[in-house]
Amino acid sequence: MSDSYNIRQATLADMPIIVAHRHQMYEDMGAADPAIHAAFEAHFLPWLRERLENGRYLAWFAETPAGQVVAGVGLWLQDWPPGYTDWSPFRGYILNVYTHSDHRRKGLARLLVQTALDWCCANGIARASLHYSDQGRTLYEAMDFQHSNEMQLNLTRLSP
């Protein structure tokens, strides 16, 4: 049960945990390539550091009573133009949702995502989005996330 865990906000010193969770998340989805892990880190660490320092990336962790971090969530505040009905200059993007395998099915992902959503509400962020894995889809639908009309194009396939 999630009551036996402590939720805390991440700091700059937690960057290695965030990187490890992101890597493990991709590995659990079958998408991590060990050969590119070092390159991934080289690109992700500067991005993460800049956003943690400027407050555009926030993260929260679930810890055991012994202080072991067993789950995490990230919230990236994306620049967004104010719209006709939403004047916030940011959109919340939830990412890096990860729970260690031996702590899953205890409500930690839900609790952490809700923590990020609560932060958004308290800070005037009117919209949040995320991409989901097959494992996470049911959770996000249960939390009332809706499918959108967003389309994407992979530009790397068009490069010469």
Image (cartoon, helix red, strand yellow):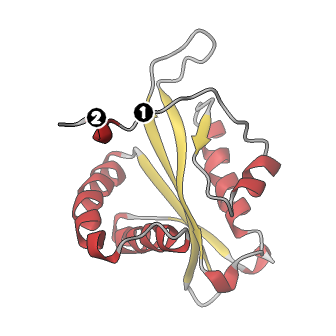
Residue 62 image point, x, y percent: 61, 72
Q: Quadrant of the C terminus?
A: top left
Q: Pointers 1 and 2 in contact (CB under 8 A)?
A: yes
Is residue 22 something that shows in the picture? Answer: yes
Question: In the picture shown, does residue 47 fall above or below 68?
Answer: above
Tell me the kind of residue under disc 1: Leu
Residue drawn where x is 77% and y is 75% of the image? 106
Q: Which residue is mark 2?
A: 158
Is residue 64 something that shows in the picture? Answer: no
Residue drawn where x is 63% and y is 26% of the image? 149
Q: Which residue is mark 1?
A: 153
Task: Look at the numbered disc 1 and give the secondary structure of its residue.
Answer: loop
Tell me the kind of residue under disc 2: Leu
Residue 57 image point, x, y percent: 42, 50
- Indicate the quadrant where residue 136 lies: bottom right
> Mark 1 Cα within 10 Å, few/some/many (few <14, many 20+)?
few
> Mark 2 Cα within 10 Å, few/some/many (few <14, many 20+)?
few
Locate residue 85 relative to residue 11 in the image: left or right: right
Residue drawn where x is 28% and y is 34% of the image? 158
Residue 128 image point, x, y percent: 60, 38
Question: In the picture shown, does residue 153 fall above or below 134?
Answer: above
Locate residue 94 relative to residue 10 in the image: left or right: right
